[in-house]
Amino acid sequence: MKTVEEIKAAIEAAVPGAGLEIVPNPSPSAQHSLLLRPESAIAVATFLRDDGELALDFLSNVTGVDWLDKEIAEKVKVTRQVSRPVEGGEPGQVQMVEETVEETRKHVQSGYLEVVYHLFSMAKKHGPVVLRMRTENRTDRVELPSFTPVWRSAEFQEREIFDLFGVVFKGHPDLRRLLMWDEFKDHPMRRDYVDPDDFEYEPTAHDEVLKRAQEHNEKQGLGT
Amino acid sequence: MGAGIKTEKLEGWNRPPVIETDGESELLELAMGPHHPSTHGVFRMDLALDGERVVKLKPVFGYLHRNHEKLGEGQSYLASMPYTDRLDYICPLTNNWAYALAVEKLVGQAVPERAEYLRVILAELTRVQNHASAIGFLLQEMGASGTPLMYAFREREKILDLFEALTGSRMMCNYMRFGGCRVDATDTWLNATRKVVAALPAFVDEFEAFLQTNEILMARTQGTGILRPELAVNAGVTGPMLRASGVDYDIRKVDHYGIYDRFKFRVPLGDHGDIYDRYMIRMLEIRESLGILEQALKEIPGGPVMDPKAKIRGFRPKAGEAYGRIEAPKGELGFYLISDGSPNPYRYRVRPPSLINLTVLEDMALGANVADVVLIFGSVDIVLGEVDR
């Protein structure tokens, strides 16, 4: 079995401009993964399946992961010009002094949806090779190429991710919801999913349910 | 490809041609399920029929969906263990093992010898009772009402009694832990298991004598529901179904997880990939499992069943991820976990063999009669608790 670095080199030799990145995995399992670019993903997948040495003919597992927007706080040293009164000078006389201050800057790293693929080889009996792909954001640019034309085993699993996470797989022959019903609007596996307020509370609610029942009844105009 | 398989290139969307109608007859749409006795639970197949022949089959899932994976994200690692029992509720112990294996990979946890042996013994007992019931259900769907299924259940009951004696529950065992097993097996239990295992070959002989050359079984199953090995591999089919199509791939032999490299056993392979081969493979796998059980029960050493260094309270794996898989009776059961350093997994994914094996249901059923669809579906061997999660 080749290491991730060797697989990356083999892919880049076969698919020019594949633009892969190794995502290290610090856990003892040491299953490092390769981050694909959506543009070249199909070419890479076809190569991995058909290459004689790798022969990754078995796509075992397809997983969706939701990564929320992350606020990252950084401490930065900033030097700026500050006006100070001149010591011993006339009142009102100022001079510019350089001062170094430590500031905390916050910036938001935008979230994305990630799809993780676990590949094995039935011919060579090795694996897993882990691939990942990421969408641009979590709202409107959620398209990724479908691997179903390369490996049929992705058919239901990609439908499940479309259903529960809202990743749209371009090129999937039958992209419908798999587990939720067609009229369902949201994607329940997203981290920021909120349960719909459609639960009917019994009239004798008590303890921690009481507050939720009161809020629900007020919203529905049922009185408290 | 494995031994004996043509390395024919797969051109993407790889399915047999849909049979065209002659234009005169009308197609009949039929919803089989969700409350059909042959669907092993609540599962629906939307069929389009030309007379008796199936020209389209679309499975509809989700009737038993309770978002098992979301539940796993909301609670600690250990708290998910009893939930895994409810995936494939015929084989709770293999589910336990797959989850424990994935978490052990995530944190680099070792398992003591005796616990490894107990895991093998319980997994193989699970395989025996699963395959026996699967054959029983298949015969039930063929019209042999009750009798073969009850023969299988008679033996299953003995195995479930053993589970109950060891774990406290027949089906919701919740037995394995990260780094071992919950309780030790007593010598009395081991002797009782030896007795049950010693009596099982007689049951297999009897079962086989009734079924193997049964005229109705052969007429109904031979040449029906054929699955080509190339398609099976490409569609990610695993377990007895894959091996019935002639692909030599058994995760016990490939990964050698646990201590499977110590046991001598063979991997039976089918020749035609039809329903009869799937029935036959299950029969042969029961025999191989009994061989493993005999060896394991002979060699089981003493010692602890739980790694004393295993962390139980305040269990927080370092950030990282792991995919662990085992050869469950129905195919490759895998768990994929992503940890962000908190007590709950950031992502908890189950790779359900039952769901993925159904990918090829339409391919196998196209052109068959409606009555054969029931058999084809039965030969896949699914449990809806795992399909819908």
Image (cartoon, rainbow, N blue to C red):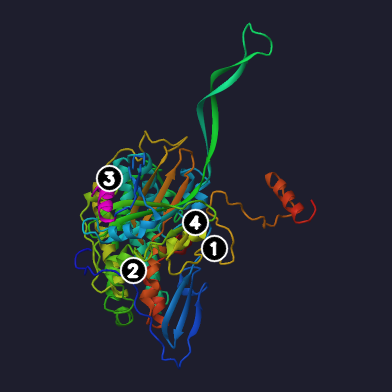
How dense is the environment of label 2, judged by Cα within 10 Å: few (below 14), some, or many (20 and up)? some
Using the image, determine if residue A93 lies above or below residue A15.
above
Q: Are marks 4 and 1 in contact (CB under 8 Å)?
A: no
Helix, strand or loop at label 3? It is: helix
Q: Residue at x 75, y 56 (%)?
A: A220
- Do the residues at pointers 3 and 1 share their chain? yes
Q: CA distance from mark 3 to mark 1?
A: 40 Å
Q: Which residue is mark 4?
A: A142
Q: Quadrant of residue B374?
A: bottom left
Left-right relation of B151 to A206: left
Query: Foreground: A65 or B43?
Result: A65
Judged by depth in the image, the label closer to the viewer, 2 or 1, is: 2
Helix, strand or loop at label 1? It is: loop
- Do the residues at pointers 2 and 3 share their chain? no
Helix, strand or loop at label 4? It is: loop
The chain to which mark 2 is attached is B
Using the image, determine if residue A61 lies above or below residue B15.
above
Q: Which residue is mark 2?
A: B12
Residue type of the residue flagged with mark 1: Met
Q: Are marks 2 and 1 in contact (CB under 8 Å)?
A: no
**Residue B289 x/y as whole percent:** 28, 59
Q: CA distance from mark 2 to mark 1?
A: 27 Å
Judged by depth in the image, the label closer to the viewer, 3 or 1, is: 3
Q: Are marks 3 and 4 in contact (CB under 8 Å)?
A: no
**Residue B205 x/y as whole percent:** 26, 69
Q: CA distance from mark 3 to mark 4?
A: 28 Å
The magenta stretch is A1-15
Q: Which residue is mark 1?
A: A180
Q: Which residue is mark 3?
A: A5
How dense is the environment of label 4, judged by Cα within 10 Å: few (below 14), some, or many (20 and up)? some
**Residue A92 x/y as whole percent:** 68, 13
